[in-house]
Image (tube, helix red, strand yellow):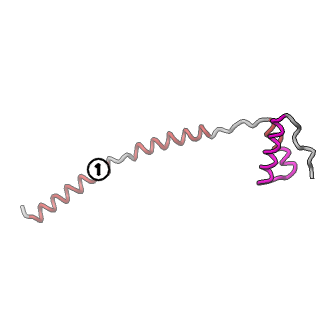
Amino acid sequence: MTLASRLAAVALASLLATGTAFAQAAAPAAKSDTKTDAATTTEKKAPKERSAESLECSKQADAKGLKGKERKKFRRECMKEAKAGTAAPAADKK
């Protein structure tokens, strides 16, 4: 056997060995983990029930036409007052 044919045989064997190494990658395990994670995240994203105070504060914010930061600020203050037991700021209309 000549040197060139030996090198060719070694190169061919290397390619075959490398191909099997890549074929044994953990891709199928990652796919099954992804399915499990997707199922878990959909279970975690179940809608929370909103309290009566939260719904009432949202209605008041809607009535005032508040949006964005103003709405968040209003709802935060409204929820504080509702939890403290005082009346919500419904009388504060523009």
Residue closer to the observer: 60 or 69: 69
Residue closer to the observer: 2 or 83: 83
Residue lying at 60% horizontally and 38% vertically, measured from the top left: 44
Residue lying at 24% horizontally and 57% vertically, measured from the top left: 15
Residue lying at 84% horizontally and 48% vertically, measured from the top left: 62
Q: Position of residue 38 (x, y in %)?
A: 54, 42
* In-image side of 24 versus 55 (left or right): left
In the image, what residue type sits under mark 1? Ala
The stretch in magenta equals: 59-84
Residue lying at 32% horizontally and 49% vertically, measured from the top left: 23
Q: Is residue 65 above or below residue 89?
A: below
Residue 44 is one of the magenta-drawn residues: no
Determine crowd level at label 1: few under 14, some 14-19, many 20+ residues with C-alpha closer than 10 A: few
* In-image side of 76 versus 47 (left or right): right
Question: Split into 4 quadrants, where in the image is the N terminus?
Answer: bottom left
Q: Main secondary structure of the magenta part?
A: helix
Q: Position of residue 49 (x, y in %)?
A: 72, 36
Q: Position of residue 43 (x, y in %)?
A: 59, 37
Residue closer to the observer: 23 or 52: 52
Q: Circle 1 — which element?
A: helix
The residue that disc 1 covers is: 21
Q: Residue furthest front?
A: 84
* In-image side of 7 versus 72 (left or right): left
Q: Position of residue 57 (x, y in %)?
A: 82, 42
